[in-house]
Amino acid sequence: MTSTQVAPPAAYTDRDAPAVSVRGLRKSYGGKAVLDGLDLEVRRGECFALLGPNGAGKTTTIEVLEGVRRRDDGGVAVLGADPATAGRAWRARLGVVSQGEGAAQALTVREALDHFAAYHARPRRTAELLAAVGLEEKAGTRVGRLSGGQRRRLAVALGVQGRPELVFLDEPTTGMDPVARRQFWELVRGLRAEGTTVLLTTHYLDEAAELADRVGVIAGGRLVEVAPPAELGAELRRIATVTWLDGGSRRQVRTEAPAAVLRDLLATTPHEVPGLTVTRPGLEDVYLQLVRTPGGDQ
């Protein structure tokens, strides 16, 4: 398979063009397809969350977009350039928070931030970053002595230090405690307010619902649905489940018209309907149904 089979997206220069445009992205490892014709578009200034089970291809997608992993096929444009051939000036416009190890272990947290600030034209102040990620009390601690969650916070600080146009956050809150996660959420909201585009992968559905303008669910190497969190799985959410007890037996009806079912029940039951509940799928229910597609457990 060759990359000439899928024309690359146009090299955009218009500020209104997508920050990320992907068509037919394919990547295999050892003959096993991880990405199988994935299409993706991320608008400038939005926070886009990529959800999927372990091994679904989230990290591979991010690495291709960052230009650190070569694709087998497909067209990719990130900030108007092909990541496979883009140069240093293009990379300076990106911020990256990966799942790998970050700063030098022998440096203190403050030293690491001060050191990497020299690589950016307009770096954020070290004190601002320490406060944003909740590491003020660890500023004098060597990186090698930080906990896993604290290292993730430092990685986030380094990823946004250079005021990037587009920031990739690959499982950024893994290992963080609830307080640190909330601080991270505020940091992302601040980036959004500045017009930064954010592409986030996460296992946490509440995080996607809290931060993302749109969510993409990846399964079987493709995006199976893209929508705002409240609209994800709209077709699935239309089905309500009406449950009640009838003579000690549990009865259940799945319907798009629960009001009609309730009217019928109340008309035929002289007293209160025992055990009556009406439920619709929540975000977690919808997500689990979306990833139960062929290949979705890769």
Image (tube, rainbow, N blue to C red):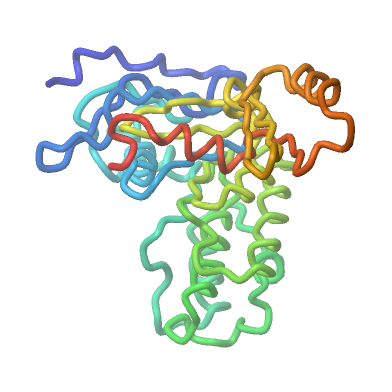
Q: Position of residue 118 (x, y in %)?
A: 51, 63
Residue occupying the point 61% across, 57% down: 123
Give 270 or 222, whichever is nearer the viewer.
270
Residue occupying the point 32% across, 17% down: 8
Give 175 or 17, whichever is nearer the viewer.
175
Residue occupying the point 51% across, 69% down: 175
**Viewed as shown, does residue 30 lie left or right of 36?**
left
Residue 14: image quadrant is top right
Question: In the rendered image of this protein, does residue 134 appear above or below residue 15?
Answer: below
Q: Position of residue 223 (x, y in %)?
A: 42, 28
Give 188 or 286, whichever is nearer the viewer.
286
Residue that protrudes farthest toward the right in the picture: 271
Can residue 80 be seen here?
no
Q: Position of residue 78 (x, y in %)?
A: 44, 30
Question: In the rendered image of this protein, does residue 275 appear above or below residue 73?
Answer: below
Q: Quadrant of the N terminus?
A: top left
Can residue 213 be seen here?
yes
